[in-house]
Image: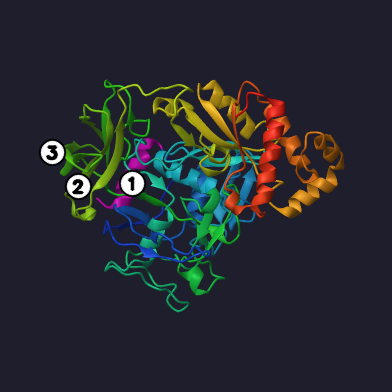
Amino acid sequence: MTDRIFFALCLLAAGCTLAAAPELVTVGDAGNPGKKVFFHEVPNPYPRGGVSYPYRIGKNEVSNAEYAEFLNACAAKSDPHRLFDERMKIVRSGKEGAWSYAPRPGSENSGVNFVSRVNAARYCNYLTTGDPAKGAYVIAERPRENGKVHEAIVGYRDLTFPDAARVWYLPDMHEFFKAGWYDGNGNYRELTPETRDETSHYGISGHASGLREHMENKFYAGAPFVLGANDKSSDAASLNTARLWQQPEYEGRAESGFRVAATAPLQFGDRLNRRNNFFFDRSEPAKLRIRNDGPMRNAAFRLELRDFANRPVRSERLNPELKTGVTELTVKLPEKDGYYELLVTPEEPLFNRQSQRIPLAMMYDPADNGADGNFGFTCHVTRRERRFSFEEFDFDLLRRLGVSNVRVDVSYNDIGGSQSVLRRIREAGLNPLAIITSSGINSYDKIAANRAEFPELAAKWEKHGIPADYAWYAEQVYNLVSAHRGIVRDWEFGNEPTYWNCLPEDYAQALKAGYKAAKLADRSAT
């Protein structure tokens, strides 16, 4: 039974109406070396393209014809998520409640553009389950740091818990680079304008032409990006992924499209429970989820448990019968607390004798010290919730791990954002250590601008011995600390002064001003 026929049968069984899914190629050579790709002035980048597991990836970018089928299935009655964009090479006809979509003549096989990263994830979900809201991705509206609300992919792709025989997702930069540039013999091709359209070693096309493509992972500071050259780019950096373009995940653009990836015919989930492999209760079982994208069969593999020092704890060879879809196997957990790794080594050639490492932690003995312990943790909570992964921070997990003090950055006036985090930390029974932003005092230009704009503050704070240059800062600190009496006891004035554009003596003046203002606001502040 061919790969595409089997997938079509799975779609029919799930009640899906999608007529055809993108053709896939299989990428093996698990454990291949990566290559350092120097990009965006990063002086020593980590190797790119090394992938320790087999996977599948779209032979081509998702086409207008394929995306039109998706629109007919999901946007015929209405289109609340704006899956369709009038600038696409797809024509919408009919009326609301009975829309119909078709690619423009001659554009059927061209890559679809103006698809946002969020809607590309919806397409992957639909291929997985027949429902654009269920699959590898959770999508929801989330506020950004500027307060604006947009749709976002919450967290990261989940290749463990969907029950489908095959999970579709967006490739990350390593999977994409390997599929397009690795030659299968330890080296990477260097594409030129003359060779950009050649099919890769694994059989994919359009990776250095057509459209730039959405990636699963994010770049510096949590920015989504597209990778690969479009037809208008011919420089070596673009052709060989040394250049990337940041693009908000809720925007579709003319030069950007996407291709899909999918789990291998045999795939092992990397989570043994829904708490990211933390185990607090001895009665909670660990379940290894094995995905079989084919008829019922057996698959042999070795399970080895190792402790924090990489010493073997237990090893066994298994050869279970796997149904189509997901088969769960109970994994015996160690009796003692600590960090462990579960190594899964399949015997199938596609895995190239590579082991999948699954980290897990036994936390049976209670470690909750409340707010009175000495162990602390720096958490960029607002950045995580509003920029990086958009997941709500799990303060309960921190408590159970023995964390008492949460060091977190806070702005002067973001009452609904970073400052609300301080209250949430206290309500969770933990002690917030607030790092007050250095905005407004970390350069002489900003200091001068604030002094000129708020001259009345100089006279007010002169009475407390604070120089005019730091009167504005004293006012911000006073208001911030006053608003958090009884909530925050410990304060830190700015972070990483190494990067401030001022002399050490001026930094000392800022600290003195902040200290005086904080003590006037709350005598118990430290």
Is 9 within the magenta?
yes
Which label belongs to residue 370? Answer: none
* Residue at disc 1, secondary structure: helix
Q: Is residue 369 left or right of residue 81?
A: left
How crowded pointer 3 is (Cα within 10 Å; few <14, some 14-19, many 20+) is rated as few
Query: What is the spatial separation of the Cα atoms under label 2 and label 1, in whole angstroms?
Result: 23 Å
Residue carrying label 3: 316
Q: Which quadrant of the structure image shows residue 313? A: top left
Q: Amino acid at mark 2?
A: Pro
Q: Main secondary structure of the magenta part?
A: helix
Q: Earlier in the sequence, mark 3 or mark 1?
A: 1
Q: Amino acid at mark 1?
A: Phe
The image position of residue 452, as x and y in percent, is 84, 48
Query: What is the spatial separation of the Cα atoms under label 3 and label 1, in whole angstroms?
Result: 33 Å
Which label belongs to residue 7? Answer: 1
* Residue at disc 2, secondary structure: strand
Q: Amino acid at mark 3?
A: Glu
Which label belongs to residue 346? Answer: 2
- The magenta segment is 1-15
Q: Which quadrant of the structure image shows residue 200? A: bottom left
Query: What is the spatial separation of the Cα atoms under label 3 and label 2, in whole angstroms?
Result: 12 Å
Q: Earlier in the sequence, mark 2 or mark 1?
A: 1
Judge depth for marks 3 and 1 and give the one in front.
3
Instruction: Pick the quarter of the image with the C terminus.
Output: top right
Is 255 or 29 nearer to us in this picture?
29
